[in-house]
Amino acid sequence: MGKFSIQESTIDLTALRKEMEDPTCGAIVSFEGLVRNHHEGRDVTALKYTHHPLMAEKEGQKILEKTLEKFPITHALAVHRVGELEIGDIAVVTLIASAHREAAFEANRYLIDLIKHQVPIWKFETYANGEQEWTAPCQGCQNSSNH
């Protein structure tokens, strides 16, 4: 089972976790991407995500299916928020369920990395000095396990 979705409302972690329950699975690995208060040395005060609705949903679902094919996992789920988010809000969640933890950890990392780099979801940030701009992943986030 795999499901990718995009929503404007707050992500309900409890409900998502419940969807992953399966007596054949001994591991559930989750990742929560939070809105942080900085980006490449600048103080962030507000953030807005926007997306291409048809393309984003389609690409996200393809990534989930690819993850399910590539790893020995049972379930994959991802939810990304769009709209106005506050510092500390959950922007994206990925969950993987499998019989064993190693596959769940590897698949989850693969899933979030592909979502971040391939799904047409864009971030517009407002900074403490009043400036605003569309941003790409920070330099420290690309090809790194730091973020």
Image (cartoon, grey):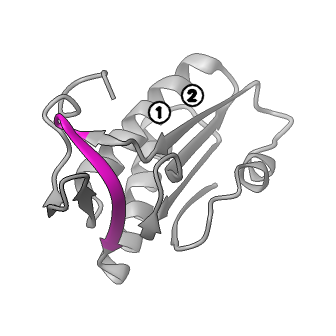
Kind of residue sitting beneath label 1: Ala
Q: Is residue 71 left or right of residue 95?
A: left
Q: Is residue 126 left or right of residue 13?
A: left
Rendering coords of residue 81 (x, y %): 48, 64
Say which element carries label 1: helix
- By secondary structure, the bulk of the magenta-drawn segment is best described as strand
Rendering coords of residue 137 (x, y %): 20, 45
Rendering coords of residue 100 (x, y %): 66, 20
Q: Which mark is residue 118?
A: none
User: Where the C terminus falls, by quadrant?
Assistant: top left
Residue 45 against residue 121 in the figure, above or below: above
Residue 6 against residue 142 in the figure, above or below: below
Give the residue drawn at x 35%, y 51%.
115
Q: Quadrant of residue 97?
A: top right
The residue lying furthest to the right in this view is 23
Answer whether residue 15 is visible to the viewer in this image: yes
Give the residue drawn at x 70%, y 57%.
12
Give the residues drawn in magenta, as a range: 39-50
Q: Which residue is mark 2?
A: 104
Answer whether residue 59 is visible to the viewer in this image: no
The residue lying furthest to the front in this view is 129
Give the residue drawn at x 18%, y 39%.
138
Residue 127 against residue 147 in the figure, above or below: below
User: Where the N terminus falls, by quadrant?
Assistant: bottom right
Category of crowding for the residue at label 2, using alpha-carbon neighbours closer than 10 angstroms: few (below 14), some (14–19), many (at least 20): many
Kind of residue sitting beneath label 2: Ala
Q: Is residue 140 left or right of residue 95?
A: left
Give the residue drawn at x 42%, y 31%.
109
Say which element carries label 2: helix
Q: Tally the numbered discs.
A: 2
Q: Pointers 2 and 1 in contact (CB under 8 A)?
A: yes
Name the foreground residue: 129 vs 106.
Answer: 129
